Image (tube, rainbow, N blue to C red):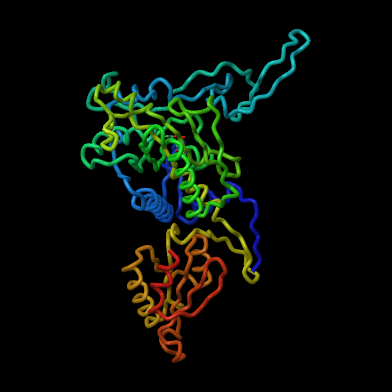
C-alpha cells in the first residue's frame, strides 16, 4: 500500500462531507442561508461522539464537575451586565461601490503611494466581491448579538437576545449549583449548547458560523489558585486533542496579547489549528477572573459569594474557562483524519478517525446479498453486536469492494463480512468472519464470539 497524503484543500473536505452525509448547506433547496449548515447522519453521529467524549473526560471523569442545560433566551439585563450589549462587536467596513460589508480585520490592506498632486500615501483595500479599491476608513462597531422579541409586543422592552456564548447560562446557574449540590472549591460547571453570532462575513465552511455550538466550562477556584487551574486545563485540552486525532504538530498555543483579549480576560491562550486557509483559532482558554460574578452581582443585586467552610470566609471565586466550538472541532478532525492511498492499483480516500469518535464503529455485511443463508447469518451477527455497540451499521448495497470504499470514506474502523466459510463450507472456519482494518486494508479471520470484545477494546 502506498501512502499518498497530499495537501488537503477545503473543497475536498466540503465535497466529501456532502457526498457522505456529514454536513450539508443549511436551507439548501432555497439557495442556503449564509453562516448556517446542517449535519447529516454521520455528521451528527461524529458530533455526538465528540460531545460525549468531552463530557466523559471533563465532567464524568473529574471530581466536582456539574452539568447544566440553560435556556438560550435569557433576561436581557444579563447581557448588559456581562458587557455584551456594549462590547460584543466587530469592526465593520463597507465597499463604497457594491455596499458589501466586511470585517475590518479580515480585509488585506496595502499602502498606496501618493500622487503628484497629493504626496501623502493612503491605506487601501480591495473589495473581494466587486474588486473596487476602497480607501481605509475608521470602522464602525457592529454588535454581533441577534435580537428578537419575547411575547406579542415588538417594542424595545420586549427585546431579547439569542445567546452569543453558552457561558452566561453557566454563570446564571452558579448560585443554583451552590445551593442545591453544595460543591467545594474548586468546582466546575459544564454546558454544551447552541450560540448565535451575527458574524459580518461568515466563511470557510463550518469555521465561522452564525449558528454554532459550544462546549464550555466555567471552573471556579480560589483567586490564588488560578494559575494552577489554568495550567491543568491547558494540559487537558491537549489530551482531548490527542484523543480525537488532532496531531500536536498541527495544534499551536498562542498567548493572546492584552490588547487582543476579550474584555473579561486577564490571560487567554488560543489553541490554533493549521487549517488550509491559515493557522486559526480552534479553541480558547481564558482566565475570566471574578469579572462575571462581580458584574452579575452588581446587575442582579443578588450576592454571588462563596462561603469557604475550611477558611470560614466569604470570597468571590475566580474563573478559568476552556471554551471549545464543536463545529470548528469537527472541521479540524475531518482535516486531521483525511487520507488518500493506493491499495493494489486502486486509489482510495479514508478517514482515519480514532475509533472512539468514528460515527460507525463497524459495518456488517453478507458477501452476497442474494444468498438468503448468508444474509440471515449476517443479520444475526449484526443484531447481536448492535445490542452492545449501537453504532454498528448494516450494509449490503453494491459489491463488497464498493461497500469497503464507502465505509472508508465514512471512517468506519472495521468491516465484518459473512461468507460461505462462516456457514461451514470449510469446516474449521465455521462461525468465523473476515474483519477488515480500515487503515491497512488487511483482513483477518476471527470467531464471531470474539468480535464484540475485539471492537470494544479498540473504542
Ligand atoms: N465563552 C467564551 C467564548 O465564547 P470565543 O473565543 O468567542 O469565547 C469560543 O469562542 C470558541 O467558540 C472558539 O474558540 C471557537 O471554537 C468557537 N466559535 C466562536 N465563534 C464562532 C463562529 N462564528 N463559528 C464557529 N465557531 C465559533
- State which image quarter holds ligand 1: top left
Q: Spot the residue most to the top.
A: 117
134 sits left or right of 414 in the view: right
Residue, far front: 311
Q: In percent of the image, x 57 and y 27: which residue is there?
A: 105
**Residue furthest right as drawn:** 116
Residue 293 sits above or below residue 449 on the image: above
Q: Residue furthest bottom?
A: 427
- Of 409 and 26, nearer the camera is 409
Q: Is residue 348 above or below residue 40?
A: below
Q: Position of residue 273 (x, y in %)?
A: 56, 44
Instruction: Tell me the residue at 52%/41% (across/down).
Output: 271
Quadrant placement of the N terminus:
bottom right
Residue nearest the viewer, comparing 72 with 269:
269
Q: Position of residue 322 (x, y in %)?
A: 43, 40
Instruction: Using the rendered view, name the quadrant where residue 326 is placed.
Output: top left
Res. 290 image quadrant: top left
Q: Give x and y (percent) for residue 141.
A: 48, 20
User: Picture coordinates of residue 60 (x, y %)?
Assistant: 33, 52
Along the line of sight, the residue nearer the viewer: 318 or 60: 318
83 vs 346, nearest the viewer:
83
Q: Quadrant of residue 302?
A: top left
Amino acid at each position: 500500500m502506498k501512502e499518498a497524503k497530499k495537501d488537503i484543500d477545503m473543497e475536498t473536505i466540503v465535497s466529501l462531507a456532502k457526498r457522505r452525509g456529514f454536513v450539508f448547506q443549511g436551507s439548501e433547496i432555497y439557495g442556503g442561508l449564509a453562516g448556517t449548515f446542517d449535519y447529516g447522519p454521520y455528521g451528527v453521529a461524529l458530533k455526538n461522539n465528540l460531545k460525549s467524549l468531552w463530557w466523559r473526560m471533563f465532567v464524568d471523569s473529574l471530581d466536582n464537575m456539574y452539568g447544566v442545560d440553560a435556556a438560550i433566551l435569557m433576561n436581557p439585563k444579563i447581557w448588559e451586565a456581562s458587557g455584551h450589549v456594549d462590547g460584543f462587536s466587530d469592526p465593520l467596513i463597507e465597499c463604497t461601490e457594491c455596499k458589501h460589508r466586511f470585517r475590518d480585520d479580515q480585509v488585506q490592506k496595502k499602502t498606496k503611494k501618493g500622487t503628484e498632486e497629493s504626496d501623502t500615501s493612503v491605506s487601501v483595500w480591495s473589495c473581494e466581491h466587486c474588486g473596487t479599491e476602497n480607501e481605509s476608513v475608521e470602522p464602525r462597531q457592529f454588535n454581533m448579538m441577534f435580537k428578537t422579541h419575547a411575547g406579542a409586543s415588538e417594542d424595545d422592552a420586549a427585546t431579547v437576545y439569542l445567546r452569543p456564548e453558552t457561558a452566561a447560562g453557566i454563570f446564571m446557574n452558579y448560585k443554583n449549583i451552590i445551593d442545591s449540590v453544595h460543591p467545594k472549591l474548586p468546582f466546575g460547571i459544564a454546558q454544551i449548547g447552541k450560540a448565535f453570532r451575527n458574524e459580518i462575513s461568515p466563511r470557510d465552511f463550518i469555521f465561522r458560523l452564525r449558528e454554532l455550538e459550544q462546549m464550555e466550562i466555567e471552573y471556579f477556584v480560589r483567586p490564588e489558585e488560578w494559575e494552577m487551574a489554568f495550567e491543568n486545563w491547558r494540559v487537558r485540552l491537549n489530551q482531548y486533542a490527542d484523543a480525537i486525532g488532532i496531531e500536536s504538530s498541527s495544534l499551536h498555543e498562542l498567548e493572546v496579547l492584552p490588547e487582543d483579549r476579550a474584555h473579561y480576560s486577564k490571560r487567554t491562550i488560543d489553541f490554533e489549528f493549521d487549517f488550509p486557509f491559515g493557522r486559526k483559532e480552534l479553541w480558547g482558554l481564558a482566565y475570566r477572573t471574578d469579572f462575571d460574578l462581580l458584574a452579575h452581582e452588581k446587575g442582579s443585586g443578588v450576592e454571588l459569594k462563596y462561603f469557604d467552610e475550611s477558611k470560614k470566609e466569604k470570597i468571590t471565586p475566580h474563573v478559568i474557562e476552556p471554551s471549545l466550538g464543536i463545529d470548528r472541532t469537527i472541521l479540524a478532525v475531518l482535516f486531521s483524519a483525511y487520507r488518500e492511498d493506493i491499495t493494489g492499483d486502486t486509489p482510495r480516500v479514508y478517514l482515519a478517525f480514532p475509533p472512539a469518535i468514528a460515527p460507525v464503529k463497524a459495518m456488517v455485511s453478507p458477501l452476497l446479498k442474494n444468498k438468503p443463508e448468508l444474509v440471515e447469518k449476517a443479520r444475526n451477527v449484526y443484531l447481536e453486536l448492535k445490542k452492545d455497540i449501537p453504532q454498528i451499521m448494516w450494509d449490503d448495497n453494491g459489491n463488497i469492494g464498493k461497500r469497503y470504499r464507502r465505509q472508508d470514506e465514512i471512517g468506519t474502523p472495521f468491516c465484518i463480512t459473512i461468507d460461505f466459510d462462516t456457514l461451514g463450507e470449510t469446516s474449521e472456519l465455521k462461525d468465523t468472519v473476515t474483519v477488515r482494518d480500515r487503515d491497512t486494508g488487511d483482513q483477518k479471520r476471527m470467531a464471531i464470539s470474539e468480535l464484540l470484545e475485539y471492537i470494544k477494546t479498540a473504542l
